[in-house]
Amino acid sequence: MANPANPIPNESDEPEREHRPRVLKGGSIITGISNSEVGCTLRNQHEGGAELKIPLEARVPDRFLLYVPLDGIAYRCEVRWRRNDRIGVQFTGTEPKPRLHYG
């Protein structure tokens, strides 16, 4: 019998949203298509991924390298969601500064 003073916590199937610290970092999406690069802004970032603001006209593939000069590394990314000029990515690994980066 459940105690009404101490209700059983809600055991939802939905995972709790991880705290994502707000950041404002510049980055480059390196698509690997004819050495193309798309400038972006990281809006929030955590260990597993980030939210990126991209130009509305940008064509970003589902998988790409995200080079963040401030971090000095490139993150291998997989797109998890898209909304207008924002995309959410999951980091699947890291690499040193890519040779393809123009900056």
Image (cartoon, rainbow, N blue to C red):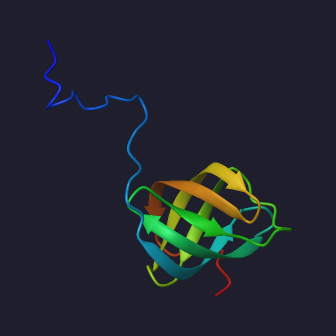
Residue sitting at 14 percent across and 31 percent down? 5
User: How many labels sit on residues?
Assistant: 0
Q: Is 64 displayed left or right of 71 in the figure?
A: right
Q: Quadrant of the C terminus?
A: bottom right
Q: Is 87 displayed left or right of 89 in the figure?
A: right
Quadrant of the rendered image containing residue 31: bottom right
Q: Position of residue 66 (x, y in %)?
A: 58, 67
Q: Residue furthest front?
A: 4
Q: Position of residue 60 (x, y in %)?
A: 75, 59
| 102 or 92, nearer to the observer | 92
Q: Position of residue 42 (x, y in %)?
A: 56, 73
Question: Visible in this render: residue 99?
Answer: no
Residue sitting at 69 percent across and 50 percent down? 62
| 103 or 81, nearer to the observer | 81
Q: Residue furthest right?
A: 57
Q: Position of residue 74 (x, y in %)?
A: 51, 69
Q: Is 22 displayed left or right of 16 in the figure?
A: right
Q: Residue furthest top?
A: 1
Question: Visible in this render: residue 20?
Answer: yes
Residue sitting at 68 percent across and 63 percent down? 86
Residue sitting at 20 percent across and 29 percent down? 7
- Does 11 sit above or below residue 2? below
Q: Quadrant of the N terminus?
A: top left
Q: Is 16 displayed left or right of 1 in the figure?
A: right
| 55 or 96, nearer to the observer | 55
Quadrant of the rendered image containing residue 38: bottom right
Quadrant of the rendered image containing residue 61: bottom right
